[in-house]
Amino acid sequence: MSTSEMASTLNPSLARVAEYAEHSDGHDRHVVQFYGADESLLDSLSRSVGAALGSGSVAVVIATAEHRDGLARRLRAQGLDPNRASKQGRYIPLDAAETLSRFMRAGNPDETLFNEAIGAVMESALAAAPDGARRVLTFGEMVALLWAQGMTEAAIRLEQLWNGLEEKYTFSLHCAYPISGFQHVHDDKLFMRICAEHTGVIPAESYTRLASEEERLRSVASLQQQALVLERLSKAYEELHESEQRYRLLVDCVKDYAIFMLGPKGHVMSWNQGAQRINGYAREEILGRHFSVFYQPEDVQAGKPRRELEIAMEEGRFEDEGWCVRKDGSRFWANVIITAQHSPDGELRGFTKVTRDITERKKAEDAMRELSGRLLRAQDEAKRRLARELHDSAAQTLAALGLNLALLETYPEVAGHPRAGKALAESAALVDEAAREIRTFSYLLHPPALDGTCLGSALRWFTDGFSQRTKIQVEFEVSPGLERLPEELEATLFRVAQEALTNVYRHSGSQKAGVRLGLNDGELTLEVRDNGRGFPAEMLEDGERGPARLGVGIRGMRERLQQLGGRLVIRNTGAGACVSAIVPVKTPALA
């Protein structure tokens, strides 16, 4: 409502009118009262109806049962007998809802049925009126019932039908609306339309009870100022509402992501098209239900949904990937982000949950991981064969060549020839060096120690040899009682130790290193430490790409560990670097 409209509605000339009785004669034949409390309405109505009945006139009251009973009690308190007046036909109390049902069709009042139903009431009332009193006092709150049900257009149409009925019958009509029914921003225009259908308007009791003209004028000025503020608030509300509508439209149209709100306890409060497509629930099926319905039964039993909300509350945000469950029971691999939503004063309002179906990506990753595993296993088998060929073929050939050279040294004509003897000795030395290189290369391709002993013994053999070759002091520690583990697991951890110690030799500058193999809480950990210069910080800060930038060997070990469900952790310790290979072991072989 604009400021000018408010001023017009609350004109001081109308401010003095506070009772129905003041409108019952003269120009105002259709009056509306807006009231705050039922007591105020009934007090005003009882004075008006009491005056009519006391003067011998007729009153028609179409109201709710509560208001009819309250009016009857007040009339008796005035010394009037509503039952006697009813028997005389001068007091006609009707139920508002029942009367309304006589002429409502398809959500709107039917004019013909209205004229028939209300016309019959008016005929009966006028017939009971004394000579000379051909005017009937009528009170109705059928319009208020329609308004309370949100049927605003039907209420306005009913007001118009009452106005049309005045062309045939003489009566004064008083309507009443609870002022609380007009508390929304968009109600101002509807309020003015209601007022326009009446010849008189009575404000709520907070205004009509003002004693003096000065008080009423001050009240009008105050209301004008409030109306100005409301105009600005209304504009801001409209802009906010439009922004919210655009946001809701945007979110609702998203089909690739499930985006919805959760209450503070985890119950679904909103639902977009993407959520329906991904999870399978229609909006009306899921609103109000707890979001744990999207989780596997074992996850719910383990308290996973509750923990996710707790983490989101504590840290502001939670993100994870895992299996979710659709309405039909099928599973999909999802990326889930839960964000806590707080009010400006810090009160938790709820959570925003964004879910993305990444099942196809997981399938591709699993297929890639399986292919990588097969390639790594094929590579290991090729290395094993090559190592065996070098050991069984090339090494044996060199050994035979060494024997032949030793045999030549026994011939006097060769041993006595200076140049021949020198060449023979050099050739024997070369054979020995080649044999050592082939043996070392064969061991690196496939450590023969793993074929006949456990991982701990194989690592001890390797670290001893590494110390001798590189002059780097290596301390080796293994948990007591650790026996044989699966062949692939032992080979993988052995390769990690090889690669890590090689990096220590090539890059760290450290003269000491430590290797520890231990089992704790179902996890087998191989740890290689040094006291060198450590890894470049940018490599460790690069997330998943870090191990790849550290070298092909480390990347290969990381892939091997992933095949076993393990992980590779690389970090600087402040006094060097540490490389840890961690693999879950379901049934550790302990003595």
Image: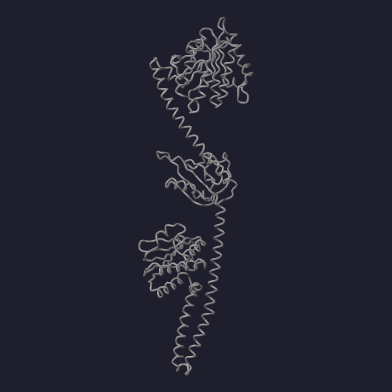
Residue 545 seen in the current view = yes
Residue 213 image point, x, y percent: 39, 15
Within the image, what quadrant is residue 230 found in?
A: top left
Q: Is residue 250 above or below residue 323?
A: above
Between residue 37 and residue 12, name the one nearer to us: 12
Residue 17 image point, x, y percent: 46, 14
Colour convention of the picture: one colour
Residue 128 image point, x, y percent: 58, 8
Residue that sits furthest to the top in the current view: 131
Could you tell me how many numbered marks the image carries?
0
Within the image, what quadrant is residue 89 found in?
A: top right
Q: Is residue 321 above or below residue 502?
A: above
Within the image, what quadrant is residue 470 found in?
A: bottom left
Residue 143 image point, x, y percent: 55, 21
Residue that sits furthest to the left in the current view: 575
Between residue 426 and residue 447, name the one nearer to us: 426
| Residue drawn at point x = 40 percent, y = 38 percent | 345
Residue 84 seen in the current view = no
